[in-house]
Image (cartoon, rainbow, N blue to C red):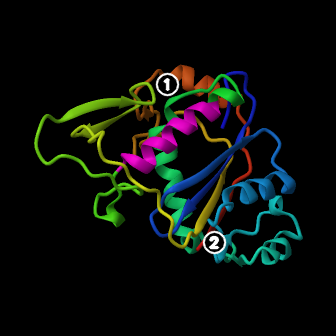
Amino acid sequence: MQTLAFRTLYVLLLITHGRRGLVRVGVTAHPASAWVWRQLIEATGWGRRPRHLVRDRDAVYGGDFAARAQGLGIETLLTPVRAPRANAIAERAVRPLRNECLDLVIPLNEVRLRTLLAEFVAYYNAERPHRSLLLEPPLPRARPTNGPIRAQPVLGACTTSIGAPLDPARTFAPYNGPVGFVVASLGERPVGKTHGSSAAPGARPRVSRGGDWAGRAASRRHRGRGARCRCSAA
């Protein structure tokens, strides 16, 4: 992810297998094995330790990651080379994060990106429907069956949450069952996503989500490619 000052930031996601809930989002400009290990430690406290951790073979995890995880009772499973479907839950979680959040904004700095991701995680876990969960969010909440339907802007109107207002008298306990984590770290990606691989030669590319193509193209020329890795746990 690129900031306004063209600084590359990396995002690490940990997501549960059972309910597809995001349990931790980390941001850093200097990914290292010690930092990745710290994210896992902070996400597995208070009885939230997974039995298995599925990840790719990226060198950022370090050579002793599997042995250290085994000391915590977590078995590390490595995905085959160039087999994203082996870690499909992590790969699928990256798509809404990019399409509904990161592709629509250019953060000012690392602090602003953390704030933005915290708001997206709250929306993703409590409001965003998932097809694999029968259109329920990862943390289901009881809603009234009658009354007005309201649309509430999320992430500065980057997306919208539509539904009946939540009942303030109801409380909901977080998911406390067996936890499986998906970890995905995102490198840099261009802000504008283009369509038109079948367009005529010389045709002007069309940019999704609106915006000025010339400005986005100029921004892309200053961007490099960041490293990517995927990992998950069950």
To which quarter of the image does residue 51 belong?
bottom right
Q: Is residue 118 magenta?
A: yes
The local crowd at label 2, few if under 14, some if 14 to 19, many if 20 or more residues have their Cα within 10 Å, is many
Compared across the picture, whether 212 is left or right of 180 comes to left
Residue 213 numbered tag: 1
Q: Residue at x 49, y 24 (%)?
A: 213
**Residue 87, percent across and down?**
57, 70
Decide: is 104 above or below 33: above
Q: Main secondary structure of the magenta part?
A: helix
Is label 2 in contact with label 1 (beta carbons under 8 Å)?
no
Compared across the picture, whether 155 is left or right of 82 comes to left
Q: Which amino acid type is shown beneath numbered disc 1?
A: Trp
Query: Judging from the image, what secondary structure is the residue with disc 1 in?
Result: helix
Residue 192 numbered tag: none
Q: Residue at x 50, y 70 (%)?
A: 177
Q: Residue at x 68, y 46 (%)?
A: 26
Q: Is residue 101 magenta?
A: no
Image quadrant occupied by the N terminus: top right
Is tag 2's residue or tag 1's residue first in the polypeptide sequence?
A: 2
- In this rendering, does residue 163 appear at all? yes
- In this rendering, does residue 197 appear at all? no
Write down the residue under mark 2. 50
Q: Compute the Cα span from label 2 to label 1.
A: 44 Å
Farthest front residue? 169
Please name whichever residue, 117 or 101, is drawn nearer the observer in this view of the structure.
117
The region drawn magenta spans 113-128
Decide: is 27 above or below 63: above
